[in-house]
Amino acid sequence: MKGSAQVLSVHDSILNALPHPVISVSATGMVLDGNAAAEGFFQASISVLKRHALKELVPFGSPLLALVDQVRDRHAPVNEYKVDLGTPRNGHERIVDIYVAPLAERPGDVVVMLQERTIADKMDRQLTHRGAARSVTALAAMLAHEIKNPLSGIRGAAQLLEASVDDQDRTLTRLICDEADRIVKLVDRMEVFSDERPVERQPVNIHVVLEHVKKLSQSGFARHIRFVEEYDPSLPPVFGNRDQLIQVFLNLVKNAAEAIGEQAGDGEILLTTAFRPGVRLTMPGLSSRVALPLEVCVRDNGPGVPDDLMPHLFDPFVTTKSSGTGLGLALVAKIVGDHGGIVECDSQPRKTVFRILLPMARVSHSDANGRKAL
């Protein structure tokens, strides 16, 4: 009996160590057991879950219920991808991959494992964002060399003509100069992308950065918008570059303010910070994965991002603004990528969230909550 108890204890430890929710379901549809991740996913303790049938924990008519029936009929495991198990209990959208398998020693019982898509999608999107940033880098270097020099000659020639033409033609020469200046400014902005030097980083208090961004915004483009802060005061410092992080969040707040618009009477931007352990990303050139436990979100109550724009949101020259260049979010993607972080966007009407995950600074001691260096 002692040996059996030890085996069960080891099994429980292994299950609870898994980051994916795992539950077992009886032949009658009742929840039999689950791991710690399942408690977090369903927002209830195992003792509470055991009092419910599976159909009471998932949306009405969920594909998961049909999968469980299919496994019982076929006596073989099945997979299903990108299924929404969101409910008012666990959040309104929880996209998961599902694995259901029969328990051979207990006919009719099945085990269900859920793998949330959010982290996997973050990684996929992050690779796309970095690819977009690299394409801008190459384009910026080419533009600087191939365009700025000829533009300077064109502008100089227009200025010489301006002195020898009548007023009607002088309007045209002035137009040439103004357009040349506009293109040079655009190329200057893009040259930021061609800077391949390593980012100089040090411990940065992200709340100081956000406060600075808020003050800048409220004194200018966001003076008509209400700001709300929900900060984790015990958050450890970010390992980053203060000036570049200011640029990132200034771009995101400006983007949010422009999305809300000046005519909105209830415009609101919510700034949040949180500690999210468990998120790790494999970085090129590193043998170990980098932890990204620091989450910073910028949320607005604007109309949201069009669905057809979402896959290309961080690509260069993609914008819905008539006067925009489409470089603001591309620059955000580059800077966050240079910091080894992740940026993503979730959008629906009146709730658009830009979420950034960043590495914490390495320290030799624990903070007040016992959070140690990674």
Image (cartoon, grey):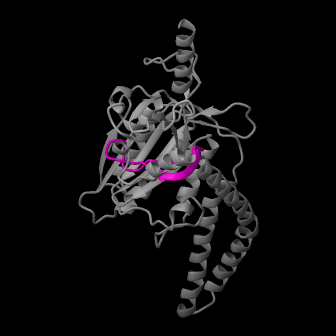
State whether residue 314 is above or below residue 196. below
Q: Nearer the viewer, residue 126 or 42?
A: 42
Image location (x, y in percent) of residue 108: 48, 38
* Residue placed furthest toward the left: 265
Q: Nearer the viewer, residue 261 or 115?
A: 115
Q: Is residue 195 visible?
A: yes
Image location (x, y in percent) of residue 258: 39, 62
Q: Specify the quadrant that holds the C terminus.
A: top right
Q: Is residue 199 magenta?
A: no
Write the start and end of the magenta stretch as one range.
75-97
Q: Is residue 127 left or right of residue 149?
A: left
Q: Residue at x 66, y 76 (%)?
A: 155
Q: Nearer the viewer, residue 157 or 30?
A: 30
Q: Residue at x 69, y 40 (%)?
A: 198
Q: Is residue 80 left or right of residue 350?
A: right
* Residue placed furthest toward the top: 2
